Amino acid sequence: MESRIIGKRSAPLSFRGLVLTAAVLAPYSFADTTTTTTHDPGQAQIVTSDVDHFWQAFDDAANVPPEQRTVIYAKEYFDVGSQGLKDFIPDRLKSPEVLSAYVESRRDFYQKARPLIQRVVGQKAAIAAAFRRLKALYPDIKFPKHVYFVVGRRTSGGTSTDDGIIMGAEMYATAPGTPYSYASLTPGMVPFFVVHETIHFNQVSQPGDDTPLLQDVVVEGTADFITSLVLSEPTERQFADRWQYGCANEATIAARLVHDQDIKKAQPWMFTFTPDTGWPPDMGYWIGYRIDQAFYFHAKDKIAALRVMLQATDFKAYLKASGYPATATPCDPEKPIAR
């Protein structure tokens, strides 16, 4: 998932007899004052008003001639949008004209997705409970003050800005019985992805166009791994296929990661739905998770281990400290073991 990542410095830590100095941890880079975060999970607001506004515009647009529908979306969705929607517009919604043209040419999809989108925004209680468990796991965690749900053009399932996490609700509106595709997500996957994005808010490093593969792998794997400590990983094929393939081919994948770790291109490891390797998509997330599993399993101080994960900047040193793959925990494709 896309991310904007923030963090702060802490003292060097040591595990398994190996000192992790400032080479592993980050220089001081505390979040700037424009970022709205809180240490209190109860202050994290889940904002669904944009979804209500979208449906108002969607319904009203059906009652006017096609040439007037853009104005409806502009007034009833864009103009009254939350800060999250405003942040979502430039790269994803683009303009009322672009959104109106997309939605109006696919009204059947949105109409069928409507009850499922309502299930997506109905995940408030599950998200709040997950945030409380995350706080208990790692007391220093920072939560975005806002988790926004919006409806878009099926271009983003989740992203974040200085104002909070933004979830594209229509991306999780896959009906039961829909043939599998990697981009088909279900309402029940929403809490996992919200917590995943919350972990990104707490990481010092972030992936980018010019970052080494090992950094991308560990940053995304860490977001999945820590999330799995408070929520069970989804059982959908997006995750299950990784475990089935990964457990059967772990030695080969680990060796290839060592070979590829310095390349500044994430594909075919991640960020593509159709890797040309024969792997399931996003195996980079999986092996990053496995590296974290090894590191966390052998750490006596679990909170300190989480702090290292979140503040790592030297990823070769972190990989060495994990001992992976020599210290890998048992790999069970039917029941991943996070702890």
Image (cartoon, helix red, strand yellow):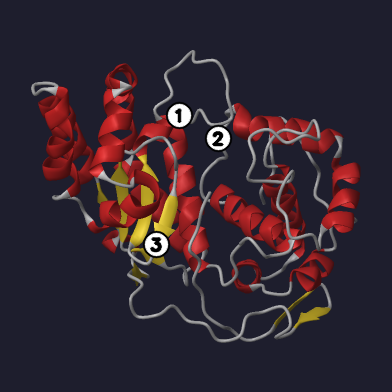
Q: Residues within 10 Å of mark 3 (few under 14, many from 20)?
A: some
Locate residue 253: give its quadrant.
Answer: top right
Expressed as whole percent of the image width and height from the top left, the position of residue 139 reads: 47, 69
Q: Is residue 269 above or below residue 204?
A: above
Callout 2, which amino acid? Pro
Left or right placement of residue 181 versus residue 70 in this view = right
* In this view, 45 is above or below 113: below
The label number, if any, that marks residue 186 in the structure image? 1
How far is mark 3 from mark 2, CA to CA? 25 Å
The residue that mark 3 highlights is 161
Name the residue tied to disc 2.
234
Q: Position of residue 72 (x, y in %)?
A: 12, 36
- Which quarter of the figure has residue 13? bottom right
Query: Element at badge 2?
Result: loop
Residue in the image at 86% along x and 37% along y: 249
Residue 294 in sight from this viewpoint: yes
Q: CA distance from mark 1 to mark 3?
A: 24 Å
Closer to the chain start, of discs 1 and 3, is 3
